[in-house]
Image (tube, rainbow, N blue to C red):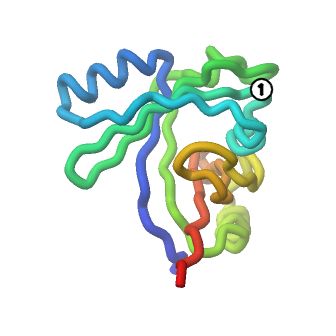
């Protein structure tokens, strides 16, 4: 059994403002401020050349949703293609990132990005990446921070 902790579900959106408005006004989620991510870690993490992101995190009870709008992307896919509605991902925090990546690849999964250290925001210093399951579903993996003590 792979040790993991469910963290959030993420959805790609072509309009962050419209998504946040719906999920807060209609569905009752509480938003956090929209953040932008443009560090050098973003393109290798997502596997999209030149990617910069606008991200909104919304919370309700014990649910955590993340909405991502690709502000820019170069080459293939373009920002418009990267912002396809309903493209989403599921995120897990794992104890051993390298072993988990290898297990997913051995099980028929593939890399979308490559293992990268996040350099900004609440997850700064955490290693992670996007992968795909055998049918193409995006999986985000974040390595749990070591216990302090």
According to the picture, the residue beneath numbered tag 1 turns out to be 50
Residue extending farthest bottom:
149
Q: Residue at x 52, y 63 (%)?
A: 93
Does 101 appear above or below 110? below
> Where is residue 38 drawn, in percent x and y?
68, 31
- In this view, 92 is above or below 71: below
Residue 137 visible in the current orientation:
no
Q: Image quarter for residue 106?
A: bottom right
Residue 5 in sight = yes
Q: Is residue 114 left or right of residue 137?
A: right
Q: Secondary structure at mark 1?
A: loop
Toward the viewer: 36 or 101? Answer: 36
> In front here: 116 or 9?
116
Look at 34% across and 24% down and name the residue there.
Answer: 20
List x then y, in percent, for residue 92. 50, 60
In percent of width and height, residue 71 lies at 62, 19
Q: Position of residue 101 (x, y in %)?
A: 69, 64
């Amino acid at each position: 059994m792979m040790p993991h902790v469910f963290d959030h579900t993420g959805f790609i959106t072509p309009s962050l403002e419209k998504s946040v408005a719906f999920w807060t006004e209609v569905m009752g989620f509480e938003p956090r401020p929209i953040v932008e991510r443009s560090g050098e870690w973003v393109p290798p993490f997502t596997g999209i050349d030149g990617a910069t992101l606008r991200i909104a995190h919304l919370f309700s009870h014990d649910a955590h949703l993340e909405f991502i709008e690709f502000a820019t992307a170069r080459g293939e896919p373009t920002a418009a293609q990267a912002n396809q509605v309903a493209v989403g991902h599921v995120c897990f925090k794992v104890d051993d990132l390298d072993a988990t990546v290898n297990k997913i690849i051995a099980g028929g999964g593939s890399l979308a990005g490559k293992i990268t250290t996040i350099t900004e925001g609440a997850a700064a210093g955490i290693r992670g990446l996007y992968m795909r399951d055998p049918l193409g579903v995006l999986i985000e993996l974040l390595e749990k921070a070591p216990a302090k003590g």
